[in-house]
Image: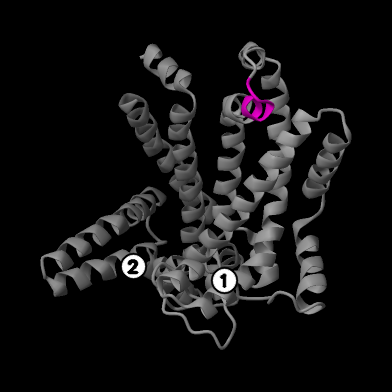
Amino acid sequence: MLRYVAGRVLFFVPVWLGVATAVFLLVRLSGDPAVAVLGDKAPPAVLDEFRRREGLDRPLPEQYARFLAKTVGGPVHALRGGWHAMVGEEREAREEREKAWNSLGRSYRTLRPVARDLAEAFPATVELTILAMALAVAFGVTLGTLAAVHRNGPVDAASMFMALVGVSVPVFWLALLAMKALGEGAGLFPVGGRLSAGTVLDPVTGLHALDAILRFDLDALADAAGHLVLPSAVLATVPAAVITRMTRATLVETLGKDFVRTARAKGLPARSVVVRHALRGSLVPIVTVIGLHFGLLLGGAVLTETVFGWPGLGKYTVDSVLRRDFHAVQGALLLMATTFVVVNLAVDVLYAFLDPRIREGYEGDR
């Protein structure tokens, strides 16, 4: 087991390097950052000064080396700052923390370190994604299981129709419809932002609902939960539809296998056969789909966050692209890609716990 996990973790390193390289090249190949930030009508002397200050006049390999050094150095400086703080060296701790915040450069839109902006935007996306995926898994696995058990019946047809609608309906249109029908029109749920204007909440984790629980603030909890309902429900539609279809397809195949027929022959209750045996044996492809969508949503639910004015990673990235803020775009893309890689690494490790054959096959190959 340890060898399997170690192998997956080691595989993460070259994958992350490839991701970081792709982000660096995409930003550079999209155009001259100096022109993107200052405009094509800026005087040549101003453009040259900008390139010199940002190191854009250096050879591309040198720019890449500096980019990697700063990116990797950010977490290192953060760890050093934590260590200095623990031993009481406050001045050194402040210096290391400042270096960590500046590791991704400064935003020309917010005039703040990009890392600090991302540290504020990312928890909003995490909170929205966790609730959306919880709804998607609950509905998707339930509907998919019912469809597989009642295959070719009315329940199966209704479940597959709902899944088809969930995949087909554009997310931005569904978001606008939900806002009109349940938000602005009916006034059932608040629309826009994470908290109402009059709600004050001292952050702990950046996840407002969790912070409200930790602060024992029931009013703030109700307000944060109310703001989460519509965007999380809209964001859950596509993952729920895909999980429904995958659960049904995998479970239909598993229900016809010998070990399921043996469980039925032993006289086990139908619910136990389906849940404890068939569904458990179908978890690997289902978890794969869940992990894929979880990583994608953590990378920034752009349309949902933009429509609902949710101050998360997706909206931050869109605003940065529109303002041609290349430091912010570069940092946001890197965070998105790194998050996706980390989630897939976690899914790979989870496979070994769900299906021992996976780690046994890995160790056998070694």
Which of the 4 image quarters holds residue 131?
bottom right
Provide residue 35's location: percent of width, then percent of height: 55, 69
- The kind of secondary structure element at disc 1 is loop
Q: Amino acid at mark 1?
A: Pro
Q: Residues within 10 Å of mark 2 (few under 14, many from 20)?
A: many
- The kind of secondary structure element at disc 2 is helix
Indicate left or right for 234 with 331 as reference: right
Q: Would you place residue 357 above or below residue 210 in this image?
A: above
Q: Can residue 194 be seen at all in this image of the molecule?
A: no
Let me know if residue 273 is in the magenta part: yes
Q: Amino acid at mark 2?
A: Trp
User: For the view shown, which residue lies furthest in the bottom direction?
Assistant: 198
Provide residue 365's location: percent of width, then percent of height: 40, 13
Provide residue 64's location: percent of width, then percent of height: 38, 50
Q: Nearer the viewer, residue 120 or 181?
A: 181
Per the image, the residue denoted by label 1 is 311
Identify the residue at image location x=43%, y=75%. Answer: 216
Indicate left or right for 102 with 144 as reference: left
Dominant secondary structure, magenta: helix
Q: How is the image coloured?
A: one colour
Which of the 4 image quarters holds residue 366?
top left
- The quadrant of the image that shows the N terminus is top left
Q: Would you place residue 51 above or below residue 219 in this image?
A: above
Identify the residue at image location x=89%, y=36%. Answer: 154
Per the image, the residue denoted by label 2 is 101
Q: Would you place residue 330 above or below residue 158 in this image?
A: below
Q: Which region shows up in magenta? A: 268-274
Q: Nearer the viewer, residue 96 or 250?
A: 250
